Amino acid sequence: MSADISRRTLLSRTAAVAGGTALVQLAGSMLLAPPARAAAPPAVGGPVPNRVTTSQPSLNGWEMEKAADSGGSVWTRPVLGTPLDGVQVRMEDVETVLVHVIQRFHYEIDVLRRGDVVGWCHPGKIRKGLAESNLASGTAVHIRPGFYPSGQRGGYFPNQLVIVRDILADLEGVVRWGGDDKKPDEALFYIDVKPGNGYLPKVADKLRGWAATPGEGAGASTDPFEPARRRAAERLARLQA
């Protein structure tokens, strides 16, 4: 744990971890209305306006866009079960996967509040040679970047790291955690496959099936500390190292 983390932050995180089990148990009964202010997105697959396109890929190969909620592929999408005012991400499969990451973080790692999650960023505001460039393509999210400053390690407690690894294992390698990068960014979670990769729709379909089944999906009573799940998470961590 970094020495410069304040006592208030430490106590806040400790309380959140202690309440994690209760959050998981209550998640199935939580019913928070999705944000109403997000614009209605168009059908996916239509032409993207020139004012939005860049013809430049982010680090993971997806095209960066100059605007969100403006006729392109990136729109503000709800994150059900949380108090967030939505998150700006690429629609369809990417949205399904990244929203799942945010929900599990909220239920099992630490309670999120409005403003804790950043999605799409303008290409002019990111460093294009780093994984943070994936924010500009709508294929990444920053979860609590103020808690986990870019370039620093050690922001998570050991039991929180177990849950991070379990989330990644459930997503079968289509998402990478920025904490594993050479220049760490422990707030960053991003799509780690290129457009057209067949694993992404497969994982997204699995998550949609879980979400439609009571007792499964984000907030379900799975145990990330169960030995078989730990082994699966450790195997993926070795592959993504």
Image (cartoon, grey):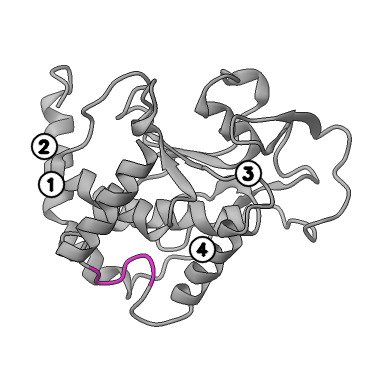
Which of marks 3 and 1 precedes in the sequence? Answer: 1
Pointer 4 residue = 203
Residue type at tag 4? Val
From mark 1 to mark 4, how far is it between C-alphas?
32 Å
Whether tag 2 and tag 1 are in contact, CB under 8 A, the answer is: yes
Give the residue at x 33% y 51%.
105
Circle 4: is it few (<14), some (14-19), or many (20+) Cα within 10 Å? many
First in sequence: mark 3 vs mark 4: 3
- In the picture, measured across the screen, residue 151 lies left or right of residue 108, that is right
Determine crowd level at label 3: few under 14, some 14-19, many 20+ residues with C-alpha closer than 10 A: some
- The disc labelled 1 sits on which kind of residue? Ala
Disc 3 and disc 2: Cα gap in Å?
Answer: 40 Å
Query: Which residue is located at x 14 percent, y 30 percent?
Result: 8
Question: From this viewpoint, is residue 35 visible?
Answer: no
Res 15 label: 1
User: Which residue has dot 3 on it?
Assistant: 194
Front tag of 3 and 2 = 3
Closer to the chain start, of discs 3 and 2, is 2
Q: Mark 2 highlights which residue?
A: 11
Q: How far apart are marks 2 and 4 (CA)?
A: 36 Å
- Does residue 31 show up magenta in the picture? no
